[in-house]
Image: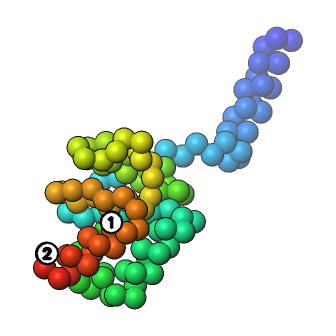
Amino acid sequence: MKKNSLKIFLLFFGIFMLSGCVNQKAQAPVIDDSEIILFYGQECPHCQIVEKYVADNNIKNKVIFSEREVNHNSANADFMMKKQESCSQFDKNNIGAVPFLWTKEKCYIGQDEIMQFFKDKINGR
C-alpha cells in the first residue's frame, strides 16, 4: 500500500510540475558590454519622464546606449544591482532605485541627473 501511495504522489507531483503550475524558469545572466546602460522600470513615473525626454530630443540617434527594464525582468534587476554596487560614488541606500544610468566613468540616479548627462553628451561636454 505504501509503494502505491508513493507512486501516486510522485505521479501527481510530476504532473503538477510539468503543468506549469510552478513557474520557476531561470533567466540567463545578462551580458551587456555597452558603455552606457539605462535601467528603468516600466511603471516608474520618473523613468517615463526620462523616456519622454529621450524620445522628444531624439537621443537614441545621438547617443549610443542600451536599455534594461528591471521591474519585470529579474536578470536585468540583478545586473543593475551589480552595476550599482560597482559605482564608488553611488549612495548604497539607492541600490535598486530607478531610473539609473551606468557609464564606464560614472553612475547617475534620478531623472534630473540622467537628463543632464544626455544634454552634456550631445553638447560635447
Q: Quadrant of residue 43?
A: bottom right
Give coordinates of residue 69: x percent, y percent.
45, 62
* Residue located 72% across and 26% down the image: 10
Nearest the viewer among 22 and 93 is: 93
Q: How is the image coloured?
A: rainbow
Q: Secondary structure at mark 1?
A: helix
Q: Please rate how many residues cluster around mark 1, counting C-alpha atoms within 10 Å: few if below 14, some from 14 to 19, many from 20.
A: some
The correct choice, above or below, for 12 with respect to 86 in the image is above
Q: Say what amino acid the circle numbered 2 marks.
A: Arg
Q: Is residue 62 left or right of residue 24?
A: left
The correct choice, above or below, for 57 with respect to 110 in the image is below
Residue pointed to by mark 2: 125
* Residue located 27% across and 56% down the image: 107
Residue lying furthest left: 124
* Residue located 25% across and 47% down the image: 89
Nearest the viewer among 20 and 59 is: 59
Q: Please rate how many residues cluster around mark 2, counting C-alpha atoms within 10 Å: few if below 14, some from 14 to 19, many from 20.
A: few
* Residue located 71% across and 45% down the image: 21
Give coordinates of residue 62: x percent, y percent.
23, 83
Picture disc at residue 73 = none
Give coordinates of residue 116: x percent, y percent.
29, 73
Residue pointed to by mark 1: 113
